[in-house]
Image: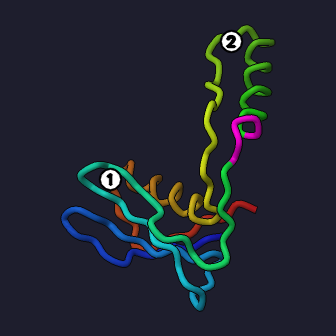
């Protein structure tokens, strides 16, 4: 589970703090939304969080299975396979996905959480 809260909003940026396991006694991570560029980035990683590069082979395991199922059912709309590693920041990635759910609807959440287990 990860919690997040709005720290600051300006004409150009929206800045969030995120807390793994909702633990506000540890150093939070920082997520910055650039309104002009329509980009969202984790600019600071929270304390005690795992970062790793996920290799294409691992990323593609599910995509290959989905494509096999689609092929069996006669579908030709296949899932695209990854060709480069993807950098992952545990907890931060979950907070970003949850914040994006609101932003695409035109909403700026003041706080929120995401649980996945």
**Residue 72: x percent and y percent?**
80, 12
Q: Residue at x 66, y 51 (%)?
A: 53
Q: Look at the picture and state if 83 lies above or below 6.
A: above
Q: Residues within 10 Å of mark 1 (few under 14, many from 20)?
A: few
**Residue 57: x percent and y percent?**
75, 35
Q: Residue at x 69, y 36 (%)?
A: 56
Q: Name the residue beneath numbered marker 2.
A: 75
Residue lying at the far bottom in this picture: please name it: 25
**Residue 51: x percent and y percent?**
65, 62
Is residue 55 one of those drawn in magenta?
A: yes
The image quadrant that residue 103 belongs to is bottom left
Q: Is residue 105 left or right of residue 80?
A: left
Camera-side residue of 48 and 102: 48
Q: Is residue 61 left or right of residue 76?
A: right
Q: Residue at x 23, y 52 (%)?
A: 36
Determine whether the residue tagged by mark 2 lies in a helix, strand or loop: loop
Q: Quadrant location of the N terminus?
A: bottom right
Determine whether the residue tagged by mark 1 lies in a helix, strand or loop: loop
Q: Residue at x 61, y 25 (%)?
A: 80
Q: Name the residue beneath numbered marker 1.
A: 106
Q: Which residues are magenta?
A: 54-58
């Amino acid at each position: 589970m990860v919690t997040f809260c709005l720290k600051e909003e300006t004409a150009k940026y929206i800045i969030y703090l995120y807390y793994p396991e909702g633990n506000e006694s540890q150093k939070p991570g920082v997520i910055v939304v650039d309104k002009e560029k329509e980009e969202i980035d984790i600019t600071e990683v929270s304390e005690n969080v795992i970062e790793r590069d996920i290799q294409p082979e691992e990323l593609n395991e599910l995509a290959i299975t989905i494509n096999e199922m689609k092929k069996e059912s006669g579908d030709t709309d296949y899932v695209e396979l990854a060709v480069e590693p993807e950098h992952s920041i545990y907890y931060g990635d979950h907070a970003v996905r949850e914040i994006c759910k609101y932003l695409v609807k035109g909403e700026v959440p003041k706080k929120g959480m995401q649980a996945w287990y």
